[in-house]
Image: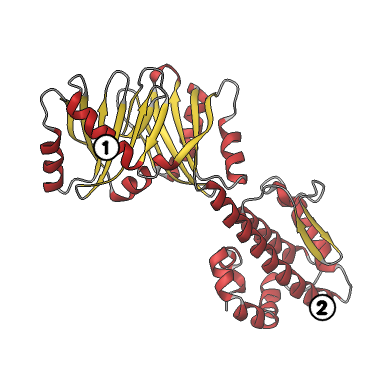
Amino acid sequence: MVSSHRTKGGRKMILPRGKAFYENLRTSFVNFNEFLLTLKEESFTGYVRLAFWDYEGVLFLEEGEIVNALEEARGRRRGGTEAVRDIMARAKSDREGKIDAYILSPELVTLLSTLPHHEPFYTDLSTEFANFKGLLEKLRREVFTGYITVELTGGKGEGMIFLQDGEPIEVLLEREGGGGLRGVEELERMVEEVQVEGAVLNVYRSAEGTEGRERAEERLEEALDLFQQLFAETRKLIDSLAKKEGTFEESFHKARVDLADSYPFLDPFMGELKHQEGRFFLSGDVNPNEFVKGVGEAYDLALEKVPLKASKEELYEELRKVLKPFLDERAEELERLGFNEVLTELKP
């Protein structure tokens, strides 16, 4: 499932193995141009790896066409057309290399073809000193886009985790001797295995990470504005029904305390989410998806806690009427930001 090679002076280049198409071919016996022509005729989708003592090159292909490349020599990595040119030249001139070709899904090739656009962020982190779960949580809060390579202690396995805006989008792990894990749903098992076995981690950040972070900050501001309006309209109704100002705000405060372990930013004593003079203010690194889920659950729990005879279902029925103009006007944003997935009871 995962293959790797370490060049002299370099870091392991870890890639998902996929299904072997060719393995252990020698550059001394292969006409590389004809080899690529064969892959084109076969509509090959996957990657070709060339490994030498002091050099490694990988060509990523879709339907037989080269879509990107990645090379490493003495610890330095490079991608793009220059890497393609260098790999082709090395395959023809150096007779001491090995060639492997592995079939992968188009989706995975698309992911891997972005590897040349990444740069080292954290290198050679040992889980003896670094908490793997804590690292993932930190990257999630920072809305990190990139990938992590995992080398289990003693050569017991290797893997990769791809992250988009802090959230895992692919998880791969191959154990020594066969077997492994594949899919986002296996992340917890991978974390457990790393904690038990120990590992060395390398984190690579997307060159587009800054742009992605800016987009995430914009989403967070938009989500905060949406929730501000939702909270204000709901407070008017609940306080009116309770005939006491501050009723809903007090219930929401209690809900925040109850959910603080799951969503630390909700903890009113930490000060990340402040409510002053009728407005919310947010500080610190908060993932926009986590924010929406957290405030959505707190909103729902607050409605359970309000000191009214009406049930939560009856309150939602009233809210759907009162909030209809808001829900209609901002329907696209509520859907896009994920509020509809959390506040399902507000749907008509």
Query: Toward which corner of the image does residue 317 lie, by quadrant?
Result: bottom right
Q: Amino acid at mark 1?
A: Arg
> For this view, does 266 lie left or right of residue 123?
right
According to the image, label 1 marks what residue? 85
Q: Residue at x 88, y 77 (%)?
A: 243
Element at label 1? helix
Distance of mark 2 from mark 1, alpha carbons?
72 Å
Image quarter hosting the C terminus: bottom right
Residue 114 visible in the shown view: yes
Q: Amino acid at mark 2?
A: Leu
> For this view, does 155 lie left or right of residue 98?
right
Q: Residue at x 43, y 42 (%)?
A: 117
Percent x, y of residue 226: 67, 68
Percent x, y of residue 190: 46, 34
Marking on residue 241: 2
Percent x, y of residue 264: 71, 46
Q: Residue at x 45, y 19 (%)?
A: 153
Percent x, y of residue 19: 23, 37
